[in-house]
Amino acid sequence: MLAKRIIPCLDIKDGRVVKGINFVNIRDAGDPVDQARVYNDEGADELVFLDISATAFGHETVVHVVREVANQIHIPLTVGGGIRSVEDMRKILLAGADKISINSAAVLNPEIIKQGAAMFGSQCIVLAVDARRIQTQESKDSKWEVFINGGRKPTGIDVLDWIKQAVDLGAGEILLTSMDRDGTLSGYDLELNQAVSELVNVPLIASGGAGSMQHFADVLSIGADAALAASLFHDGQMKIRELKLYLANQNLPIRMV
Amino acid sequence: MMSKQSIPILLIDAGTGNLHSVFHTLRTISDQIVISDKPEDVFKADRIILPGVGAFSGFMQGLLNRNLVDAIDNFVKKGNPLLGICVGMQAFFDFSEENGKHAGLGILPGTVKLFQNMPDLKIPHTGWNQLWFHEEVLLLQNINPGNYVYFNHSYYCVPENPDDIAATTDYGIDFCSIVQRENVYGVQFHPEKSQKVGIQVLSNFVNSGRKS
């Protein structure tokens, strides 16, 4: 049976691991290769690298980081941040990444999804979406808006519409971050994740809000195929091995190592 | 037994994707690996690994453009060991239904099909899933039924001859995750991304006895 995945995310700036709370207040948390090795040994099912460098030079360093990690660690790597073209994708894939995650570039130019999928296959193209809940008075249905540029820029685009379109264009997986929950430790946005899981037939990685082991169990039980967290794992507040044991005991399909 | 020019392990570059991960994982097992896209190197190889990513047709085109199809065919007919990974395994069969109908190498009889749309079954099949088998063939030495390996694919192989199926994996159906006929081996998963279990599979292939 296909196992539910636990995915630590490493936010990388200029080649170093950092973590922001609510997309601001960045602080340094170490060497990505060392951190990747720790996660690998703890039983992480996959690693996500999110490059939040602001400069071209900063982005260049990620290629080096990916190569180093891929050389030493034998688990799947997904890399996103700053990818603007199929050429950028190729660079990262040739460095040893397995999947590419695209966010702002796809919103600005949806064709990049199609081009990437045609070139490397849908299984390689992860659509990352930063979603913020919209308060609506007239409708009882929940709505979420797509934000780009690291969560700084609203787009007016509806999250569910966008995800549907992106999957039709060839996105093979969705990495869905709830901006409302990110950094709050109050749990994943279950309603959002369930809505996306029911909407499209590609794997879904839930992100934003994990604070307890129960939060992981909750989101993995309502349709998410993988659950991602960053600071929770970095800070050592939660050990991946203990989390996976907990989830296995809740009868979720989990790969124990 | 080996000529001076022989290549112990040849990793074939079809030009479509990343060989880096496979190469570095193999390096933990052996330091006698050569990456090449030249048919003359195929003739010198003792064993060949054919990793494949991306679309089936692009991968086959990459082999054709480099005149590797006949070279690989001859290599196999001589009884030399060949291991295909992911699309590299799919390429062994007669044809694939990915984006139309595309001919494969035809080394093994069978086809490559898209996973059926079923409720609760997402496509692509992405993540860690289990290997099930009754008989411990060469690739499965020191591996237990139920061990997890990493998959990332939308299409799967349907060998015509059930005896060619060495292991299956459950994803809505029990599909063929390891194929073997004599000296031809294929794995649908990514051993280079499957930690210890994957390294064991590669090591079983690399360290297997000489061709019979």
Image (cartoon, helix red, strand yellow):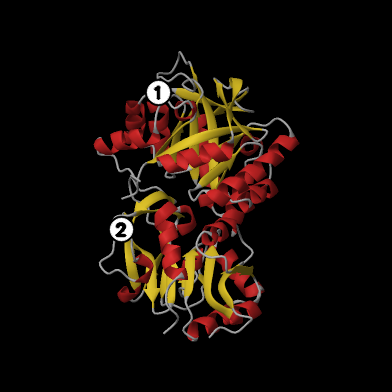
* Relative to A109, A187 lies left or right: left
* Relative to A90, B130 lies left or right: left
Residue placed under numbered mark 1 in the picture: A211
The residue carrying pointer 1 sits among few (fewer than 14), some (14 to 19) or many (20 or more) residues within 10 Å by Cα, namely: some
- The chain carrying label 2 is B
* Relative to A5, A31 lies left or right: right
Residue B173 — which label?
2
State whether residue B179 is above or below residue A249.
below
| Residue A250 placement (x, y as % from top left) | 25, 35
Within the image, what quadrant is residue A120 found in? bottom right
State whether residue B105 is above or below residue B193.
below
Residue furthest out toward the top: A137
Element type where label 2 sits in the image: strand
Residue at the spot 63% in from the left edge and 53% down from the top edge: A94
Element type where label 1 sits in the image: loop
Decide: marks 2, 1 in contact (CB < 8 A)? Answer: no
- For badge 1, the amino acid type reads Gly
Residue at the spot 64% in from the left edge and 64% down from the top edge: B15
The residue carrying pointer 2 sits among few (fewer than 14), some (14 to 19) or many (20 or more) residues within 10 Å by Cα, namely: few
| Residue B199 placement (x, y as % from top left) | 44, 59
Within the image, what quadrant is residue A240 found in? top left
| Residue B164 placement (x, y as % from top left) | 35, 74
Question: Is residue A170 among the parts visible in the rendering?
Answer: no
| Residue A219 placement (x, y as % from top left) | 36, 31
- The chain carrying label 1 is A
- For badge 2, the amino acid type reads Ile
Gap in angstroms between the C-alphas marked 2 and 1: 36 Å
Residue at the spot 35% in from the left edge and 46% down from the top edge: A257
